[in-house]
Every structure is written in C-alpha cells, then in structure tokens.
C-alpha cells in the first residue's frame, strides 16, 4: 500500500472516498471488490481519529433487543458473524458477564429471555446465510456465583447474572489497514496525508460532481482527482467538509458527541463485565441505568464507553484531564471495589461521534448510521455522505452505500465482502515487545514502506499497541524515534518535539515519568 500520488492523477475513477477510518476503508474495499475503479484519500493518518477510539468490541446487537429494534439486532448479529468468519485473525469470541437485579425487567428471568432470543436470532441468521449454527450458549447463574466472578459489582438487590458470547477486535488500527490493503490488492489507490479541498462539478449544468481538488499535505502540491462519484466518509468532519468543499450547493447537519474509552493498568478479567452507571438508559422497555463495560484487552482492562455533550468544533482534541477525571469518578460510583485511580489510566481513546439531533444536548449518540444521497437532498448527483456510528456495521453501511451509488448509474454488481476472507498481511507487524534494535528498525521500515506511516505518532500509537498498553520501554521508544529521524532526516529539535507530542497523549503521569527518565538515560 505504497503512497504514489501519481496513481490518483491523469485517470477517471468510478468513486473517490474521502476519509480513511473504518467506514471509508470499508467503502473502498466494497467498491474495489466489485470491480469499480476506486481511490481513497485521508488528510491525516489512516484510522487516526474516531475509528482509533474503540472499546475493541464487535457488538452482536443484544442491547437492541431492549429497544425492540429487531432489524438492527439482526444486522449486528450478521455483521458479527461475518467478521468472525472472514477475519478470524482480527476478531475473536469474547464472553460478557452482566449482573441481574431484582426480579423485574433487570432480573435473571428477563435477562435470560433476552439472551435466549439473541441466541435464537444468531441461529436463524446463520441458517439464512447458509452457515452452520454454532453460536456458544449463554447461561444464567445465581447471585452467589455472580458475586464470586465479579466481587466489585453493586451487591444491593443482586439476584443473579448471565454470561453470553460476543466478539472482540484485538487490533482495531491494524484491521483498518488490512481492509484498505485488500482494496488496494483489487486495484484501489489509497493515500494518506492528502486533503480533499474542493469538489469539482460537471459542466454545463453543474448538476453532478466530477471529482475533487486535493492537496498533498507533505509537499503542499495541489492536483485534481477525477471521478464519477464522491463518497464523504469523514466521520465527525462530514458536515464541515461538505460546507467547505461544496459551498452553498451542498448541506448536511450533524450533531457531535465526545466519546471516551480508558485503557487502564488494572489486570484484565477473563470476560467483559457490564456494570450499571448513574445515567439513565434510553431503552424502550427498561429505563434503568446505562452500563459501563470493563473489557479485557491484551492483559489490561479497558473501560467504556462514556459520552459527553460536545459544543466545540470538529477539529482534533487534546487529551482532556477533566473529562478523564469525570469518567473515573462516574465509574467508581458504579464499581467502587475496583478502586480506579487517575494514575491507573494509561491512555484515553477519545473521539467525536454523531449525536442524536443537531446539538446532541444530552450527550446522546446517533442510533443508526445514515447514508445521504445529495442528488435527493441538494440536487447534486454522484455525491454521497455517510454518517456512521459503529465499527460493527461499517461493512454493511458500505455495502448499502455502494448499492445506492450503482443504482444511480442503473448498474448492478453483487457485493463480495460478505464472503471474501480478509488476509493477514505479513507486511503489517504489530508487536514490538522483545524485539532487538535491528528488529525494531525493520518494524519501522515495514510500516514506512507498506502502510504509509510517516510520523512518530503513526508508528508508536497505531502500528503497535505496546505504548498504549504501558509495556513499551524507553529504549524501544528511542530506537523507533531515531529510526524515523534517520529516515526522514529530522534534526534533534524536531525529534524532541515528536517525542513530546506522543508523551502528551499518555494519561498516566507515572508511566510518563518512567519513559522520560529512561529517555534521558539513553540521551534522546
């Protein structure tokens, strides 16, 4: 997946995708696998914004049964099964444990009925798709058994609990890169550090798009990408980008909510634990409290997800100590026995997601992804915007978007991403623990050559999870930085600046001090 901007010029694509998160990557993969000539550009690094903010779970839709939204539950179940079947090296089963309280809608019987229905739907979806049913069975347990498995949960009114099977994506950033790589293997062109500045409209009626004007963020050079259609998959930037790139001719309104997940130094449990928060649920049949999930990930506990009303711009956000403190306080109120402290927080995954309504005043996220055909809303053909809400259904949303695009052309090409396996590409190593200096330099070379990692943060925060997990040592940190500095000829001042930018992203002051002391010892 080499970055060659000459491939974007002097030809006309069927579709150009703007945005290199999970949603844009899925659109590019779907279009390329259908034989459409496809380009994707991303102004920063792939998977560097909202898609980087992940609880590492692939939801099966069980919570949608509380909303009586069976269509969304079935969609999520199917997508979870597709992930497990086509990308088993990235997505694996994960057990979830939820305590039950009282004997009403949150009691063991109601919870057991929900799990039974969930498993029935899993079996029906498998049969409908021509696969063998084999979803792991859930189970109910008494209060004593639940208390033994999760001693930190609220004991008041505890009447039992239940375990059911979900799924987890262990390397979310790597998954986006591999999805993009498969698109490239099928003829797509993908490039990061390219900004889509302005849409181009057809002449003489200017009733459709014919491409866009772009800027190489590394050199400042500008060029044009010609295309029959443009898909706006810029996430929280969707409305701002439409306004900037299309001017008054195109419109889109999206409310914004700030979403956070915390990587902690607490040891992982063997299952994901659901604990109730102090905020009310938006369930249609159970107005009880919302849930925190404590998810095991690479030996650590990740806690999420919380949502805050966001009134700022959709630009990049700095680490938010006040938001982290509020998150920790809210979680400790729900699960005091865990004793979560601010210095237990290694890293804060945070990002903006679409809100429910233009302002999302109560911090409520959007419940369903939206595909906006600007031919219908603004009279501009060939222009689509995707307001996407979740990892799990990104593939399905991409399938639906490409279907609509083809219908606008009166064409039909069958989707292939439901059955096509996603390879585990060897040029995308992920683990750095235990690597020698020479091996670390090879690690960096692989990613600068094959995944367009040009900044220190690209490598240290997204091509590996070892720093985020608090297990990278100062010497490894220094070798990676020095290798990049040598490759791109960075002076000493710029090296220190790059190191500080990454250190500022870390939440644990203790871990930060350890790294800084170690870096001083190796004379960074």
Image (spheres, rainbow, N blue to C red):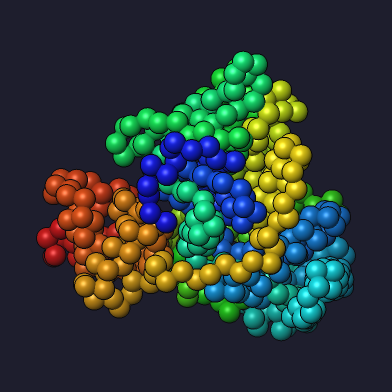
Tell me: 339 left or right of 406: left
Q: Residue at x 30, y 78 (%)?
A: 434
Q: Considering depth in this image, is 248 or 472 the residue closer to the camera?
A: 248
In the image: residue 99, left or right of residue 234: right
Quadrant (top left/top right/bottom left/bottom right) for the N terminus: bottom left
Asked where in the image residue 516 lies, by quadrant, the reply is bottom left
Above or below residue 316? Residue 521 is below
Q: Position of residue 472 (x, y in %)?
A: 32, 68
Looking at the picture, how far across and down is residue 191, in whole percent? 43, 46
Most extreme residue toward the front, as rendered? 11
Q: Residue at x 75, y 28 (%)?
A: 376
The answer to whether 141 is drawn above or below residue 90 in the figure is below
- Is residue 328 visible in the rendered image? The answer is no
Image location (x, y in percent) of residue 110? 86, 68
Compared to residue 271, the image places residue 290 above or below, namely above
Q: Nearer the viewer, residue 514 or 181?
A: 181
In the displayed structure image, the side of residue 207 where residue 315 appears, left or right: left
Number of disc labels? 0
Q: Image point 60% across, 28% down: which residue?
A: 209
Where residue 213 appears, x then y in whole percent?
A: 46, 29
Name the image quarter holding residue 450.
Answer: bottom left
Residue at 46 percent across and 48 percent down: it is 190
Instruction: Using the rendered view, name the quadrant where residue 318 is placed.
Output: top left
Frontmost residue, 134 versus 333: 134
Q: Residue 70, can we see it?
A: yes
User: Viewed as shown, does residue 502 lie left or right of 231?
Assistant: left
């Amino acid at each position: 997946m080499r970055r060659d901007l000459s491939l974007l010029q002097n030809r006309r694509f069927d579709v150009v995708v703007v945005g290199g998160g999970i949603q844009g990557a899925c659109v590019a993969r779907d279009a390329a696998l259908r034989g459409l000539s496809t380009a994707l550009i991303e102004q920063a690094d792939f998977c560097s914004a909202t898609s980087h903010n992940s609880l590492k779970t692939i939801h099966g839709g069980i919570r949608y049964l509380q909303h009586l939204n069976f269509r969304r539950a079935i969609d999520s179940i199917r997508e979870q099964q597709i992930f497990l079947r086509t990308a088993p090296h990235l997505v694996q089963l994960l057990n979830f444990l939820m305590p039950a309280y009282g004997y009403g809608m949150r009691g063991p019987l109601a919870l057991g009925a929900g799990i039974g229905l969930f498993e029935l739907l899993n079996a029906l979806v498998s049969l409908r798709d021509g696969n063998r049913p084999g979803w792991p069975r859930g189970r109910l347990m008494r209060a004593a058994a639940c208390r033994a498995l999760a001693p930190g949960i609220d004991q008041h009114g505890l009447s039992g609990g239940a375990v059911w099977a979900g799924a987890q994506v262990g390397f979310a950033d790597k998954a986006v890169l591999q999805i993009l790589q498969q698109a490239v293997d099928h003829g797509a062109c993908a490039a990061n550090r390219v900004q889509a500045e302005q849409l181009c409209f057809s002449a003489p009626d200017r009733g459709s798009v014919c491409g866009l004007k772009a800027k190489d963020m590394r050199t400042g050079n500008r060029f044009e990408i010609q295309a029959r259609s443009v898909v706006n998959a810029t996430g929280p930037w969707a409305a701002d980008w439409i306004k900037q790139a299309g001017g008054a001719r195109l419109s889109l309104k999206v409310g914004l909510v700030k979403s956070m997940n915390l990587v902690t130094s607490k040891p992982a449990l063997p299952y994901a634990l659901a604990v109730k928060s102090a905020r009310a649920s938006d369930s249609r049949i159970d107005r009880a409290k919302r849930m925190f999930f404590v998810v095991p990930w690479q030996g650590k506990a990740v806690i999420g997800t919380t949502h805050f009303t966001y009134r700022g711009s959709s630009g990049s956000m700095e680490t938010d100590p006040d938001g982290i403190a509020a998150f920790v306080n809210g979680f400790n109120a729900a699960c005091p026995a865990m004793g979560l402290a601010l210095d237990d927080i290694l890293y804060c995954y945070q990002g903006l997601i679409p809100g429910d309504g233009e302002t999302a005043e109560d911090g409520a996220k959007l419940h369903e992804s939206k595909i906006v055909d600007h031919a219908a809303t603004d009279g501009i053909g060939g222009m689509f915007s995707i307001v996407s809400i979740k990892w799990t259904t990104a593939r399905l949303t991409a399938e639906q978007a490409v279907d609509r695009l083809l219908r606008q052309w009166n064409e039909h090409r069958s989707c292939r991403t439901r059955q096509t396996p996603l390879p585990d590409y060897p040029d995308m190593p992920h683990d750095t623990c235990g690597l020698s200096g020479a091996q670390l330099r090879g690690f960096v070379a692989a990613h600068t050559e094959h995944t367009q990692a040009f900044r220190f943060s690209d490598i240290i925060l997204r091509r590996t999870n070892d720093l985020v997990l608090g297990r990278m040592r100062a010497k490894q940190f220094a070798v990676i930085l020095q290798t990049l500095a040598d490759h791109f000829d960075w002076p000493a001042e710029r090296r220190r600046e790059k190191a500080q930018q990454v250190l500022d992203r870390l939440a644990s002051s203790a871990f930060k001090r350890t790294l800084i002391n170690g870096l001083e010892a190796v004379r960074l």
